Amino acid sequence: MELFNSAFRKNVSFVRPPYFIISGFVGLPNMKYYYVFLFFVFFISVLGNTVVMAVIYLDHNLRTPKYLAVFNLAFVDLMGSCALVPKVLDIFLFNHYYIQYNDCLTFLFFCYTCLSMQAFNLVALCYDRLMAIMFPLHYQVKVTHKIMFSLIASFWLFAVLSVLTAIGLLTRLSFCKSVVINSYFCDHGLLYELACNDNLPNVVIGFLLPFLILWLPMGFILSSYICIAYTLGKVAVAQERVKALKTCTAHLSLVAIYFIPILITFTLGPEIHPNARIINLSLTSVFPPMLNPIVYVLYTQEIQLSIKKNLKLNCPSQDNIN
């Protein structure tokens, strides 16, 4: 009977708030200029990723396993930008700080799924470079459309299930301490810290998710480039070594853009001022989607040639005009 009463009291104390409050920056003047800057970054991200997706779709020469991963990366960047930035601008630029409970969890789902898939796409592209350099004679067998599609589909399934598991554990929490989230979006870690019942499963998955979606992919990428460096070290001709390294330039740039800001944030941890942490995390969320298409256009000759070819086809020559 006492056990029943105890369980009953736990159910009575369960509190699911109708909304949360996204506090954002505290005490910083003229922050509206920062949000205008975010809108500019968002516009460039949407334009750049749309162009990359269109070029890959229209050019049959780019229908290769590698560019299947590039297309998926552009799609994830586009989806992530559209899920995050408009909502952030609505919250802070138009002072809509209140977000409904279910909307908050949906916001969290799209942000974390896209964050995960950005890392996993870098793994898929790293696999492509690893096979191309270490097994050049067997590249066509080891990197096929079927293998790349299966790899990307597996990453999507794992990312979605992982984030849904974290959200499912959030729904069992009772929020009777506060409903104020000291971040720029519905941050998983800050959400479960507001709970007043047992949040140990949330703490566990809060440690497990970064390992699975950040540190494990980064470990694979670093290990792969160690193997690539070892393989290239055995190449006698320096010109061939440089040529092989150039094929990795775009991918290495994407890895640096994505992982370095995250490493800085996680390394400094609680030493960072809350406002500085929000700025760093927000820039980490919006800059890679903006820079990724720029990097691929600048460093990938195939995309450059495809863009030039499409521009020539769409722009009539001077002779035709006359």
Image: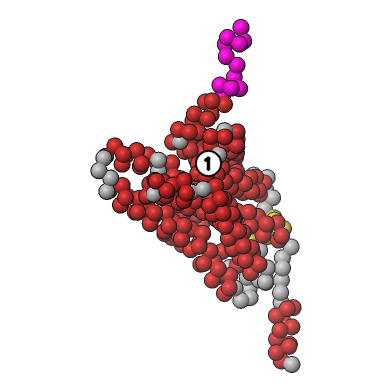
User: Which residue is the extreme one toward the top?
Assistant: 322
Magenta stretch bounds: 311-322
> How many numbered circles are shown?
1
- Placement of 224 over or under 322, stated as above or below: below
Residue found at x 72% / y 65% = 17
Residue 55 picture quarter? top right
User: Which residue is the extreme one toward the bottom?
Assistant: 1
Residue found at x 70% / y 56% = 103
Residue 183 picture quarter? bottom right
Residue found at x 67% / y 57% = 106
Which corner quadrant holds the C terminus? Answer: top right
Inspect this view and state whether residue 152 appears: no
- Placement of 254 over or under 186, stated as above or below: above
Residue found at x 54% / y 71% = 204
Say which residue label 1 marks.
64
Pick the front one: 234 or 56: 234
Pick the front one: 272 or 65: 65
Q: Position of residue 275 (x, y in %)?
A: 51, 53
Question: Are there few (<14), some (14-19), or many (20+) residues within 10 Å of tag 1?
Answer: some
Q: Position of residue 190 (x, y in %)?
A: 58, 63
Kind of residue indicated by mark 1: Thr
Which corner quadrant holds the N terminus? Answer: bottom right
Q: Position of residue 101 (x, y in %)?
A: 71, 61
Query: Secondary structure of the magenta portion, mostly?
Result: helix
Residue 116 picture quarter? bottom right
Give the secondary structure at mark 1. Answer: loop
Pick the front one: 64 or 49: 64
- Placement of 24 over or under 13, stated as above or below: above
Q: Position of residue 228 (x, y in %)?
A: 35, 50
Q: Is residue 95 magenta?
A: no
Pick the front one: 45 or 234: 234
